[in-house]
């Protein structure tokens, strides 16, 4: 425990028998390990100590110091508070008066040169990416949206051909079958003219659920074995990338490369070639969607990158991509978006973009045939309906 020191300055607060004077150099913060050193010096590291000397707890606060810096919020005396609570009050004293508040133990512990936050706030969690996809699931010629809701059921929202969706019916029961699915994509994978759903399940296998053309799906067969090959894939999309008339799967793998798995037209995929090098270019991309955004009869990829901008990568009809142009400025507009889908939602022949924004509303951005989009209208109200998807 440090020795007592008397100061005659007007603003003095006693702590561990040491004078705290407001004219000493200040320091902002210190790590828990440094505070442990101070406590070891002041009190033998006993955070609940009360020896009757008028100073309490691991850092030997006087009652006036403890209450003056807000300690009474936690407990009447420092020794009755937790270690963390005592350190938090210590932080306030340190910020106001520097390590000289503990004249011997502070400098000995390096309190004034640490500057670490002892209890940093947890980083904001990354948004949970929604599992949604677009296609004409009921065969009416209009683009719909399917998505896995908070109860792990696959819901269908039918499009009106004018940029809106409605409904919310179950596509495969209401038993929570889709729990654990990471991502889904829509396409006619078995060549019967009806939209199916492919998705990476909880075991990291790519499953196929075939559509009936009336808004329902069934099945659940493996599209590429059952070995958990798709572990690490966070997002996939589907289209005919090599223009052979069969639906393929593209996805960002665990190494942040965009991989192409070509379809056989019978519900299976194979391969796994790189679509744009093997340099981890797609690190930070949150979602991707496929469509012919430039009206050149080749399938392109749009994706939200690490800077929250929507990028366009032009396809070559051979399963390769190039480019990376902004589709709607470079202002980070897409921050907080949790899904991305591409389809002609308003029936004008142009590929549009739909996605769930930070307010959990489904937004529509209209395409211009030149690789750009604009707008941002609600497709189903503005009441945050898509929370949990």
Image: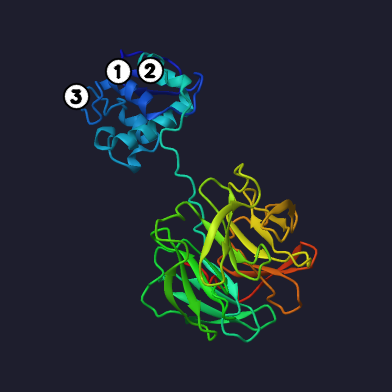
**What residue is rendered at 63% in x and 78% in y?**
143
Q: Nearer the viewer, residue 6 or 149?
A: 149
Seen in the picture, residue 295 relative to 335 is either above or below; the reply is below
Crowding at dot 1, Cα within 10 Å, few <14 / some 14-19 / many 20+, comes out as many
Nearer to us of marks 1 and 3 is 1
- Residue 276: image location, x then y, percent: 66, 49
Q: Quadrant of residue 45?
A: top left
Question: Of marks 1 and 2, which one's residue comes earlier in the chain?
Answer: 1
**What residue is rendered at 32% in x and 42% in y?**
74
Q: Nearer the viewer, residue 266 or 340?
A: 266
* Residue 109 marker: 2
Question: Of marks 1 and 3, which one's residue comes earlier in the chain?
Answer: 1
Rendered-image quadrant of the N terminus: top left
Which residue does the numbered mark 1 point to in the structure image? 41
Q: Is residue 49 left or right of residue 29?
A: left
**What residue is rendered at 58% in x and 77% in y?**
191
Helix, strand or loop status at disc 1: helix
Q: Quadrant of residue 347?
A: bottom right
Crowding at dot 2, Cα within 10 Å, few <14 / some 14-19 / many 20+, comes out as many
Q: Quadrant of residue 21?
A: top left
Q: Are marks 1 and 3 in contact (CB under 8 Å)?
A: no
How far apart marks 1 and 2 lie (CA) works out to 8 Å
Which residue does the numbered mark 3 point to in the structure image? 51
Question: Of marks 3 and 2, which one's residue comes earlier in the chain?
Answer: 3
Q: Nearer the viewer, residue 312 or 220?
A: 220
How far apart marks 3 and 2 lie (CA) works out to 23 Å
* Residue 168 marker: none
Seen in the picture, residue 314 relative to 101 is either above or below; the reply is below
- Residue 255: image location, x then y, percent: 53, 45
- Residue 25: image location, x then y, percent: 51, 19
């Amino acid at each position: 425990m440090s020795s007592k020191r008397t100061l005659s300055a007007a603003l003095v607060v006693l702590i561990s028998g040491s004078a705290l004077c407001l004219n000493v150099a200040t320091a902002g913060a210190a790590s828990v390990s440094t505070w442990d050193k101070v406590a070891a010096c002041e009190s033998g590291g006993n955070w609940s100590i009360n020896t009757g000397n008028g100073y309490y707890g691991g850092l030997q606060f006087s009652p006036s110091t403890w209450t003056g810096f807000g300690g009474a919020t936690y407990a009447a005396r420092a020794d009755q508070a937790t270690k963390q609570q005592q350190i938090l009050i210590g932080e306030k004293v340190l910020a106001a008066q520097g390590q000289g508040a503990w004249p011997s133990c502070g400098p000995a512990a390096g309190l004034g040169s640490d500057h670490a936050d002892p209890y940093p706030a947890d980083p904001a969690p990354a948004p949970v990416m929604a599992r949604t996809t677009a296609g004409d699931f009921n065969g009416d010629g209009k683009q719909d949206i399917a998505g896995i809701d908070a109860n792990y059921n696959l819901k269908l929202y039918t499009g009106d051909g004018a940029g809106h969706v409605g409904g919310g019916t179950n596509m495969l029961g209401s038993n929570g079958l889709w729990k654990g699915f990471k991502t889904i994509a829509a396409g006619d994978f078995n060549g019967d003219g009806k939209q199916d759903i492919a998705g990476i399940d909880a075991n990291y296998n790519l499953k196929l659920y075939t559509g009936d053309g009336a808004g329902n799906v069934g099945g659940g067969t493996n599209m590429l074995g059952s070995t958990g090959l798709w572990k690490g894939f966070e997002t996939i999309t589907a289209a005919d990338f090599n223009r052979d008339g069969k639906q393929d799967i593209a996805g960002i793998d665990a190494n942040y490369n965009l991989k192409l798995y070509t379809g056989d037209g019978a519900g299976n995929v194979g391969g796994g070639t790189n679509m744009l090098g093997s340099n981890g270019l797609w690190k930070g991309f949150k979602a991707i969607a496929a469509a012919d955004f430039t009206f050149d009869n080749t399938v392109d990829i749009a994706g939200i990158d690490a800077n929250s901008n929507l990028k366009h990568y032009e396809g070559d009809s051979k399963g390769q991509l190039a480019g990376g142009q902004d589709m709607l400025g470079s202002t980070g507009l897409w921050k907080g978006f949790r899904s991305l889908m591409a389809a002609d939602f308003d029936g004008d022949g142009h590929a549009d973009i739909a996605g769930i924004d930070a307010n959990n509303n489904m937004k529509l951005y209209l395409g211009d045939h030149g690789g750009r989009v604009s707008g941002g209208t609600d497709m189903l109200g503005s009441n945050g309906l898509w929370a949990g998807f």
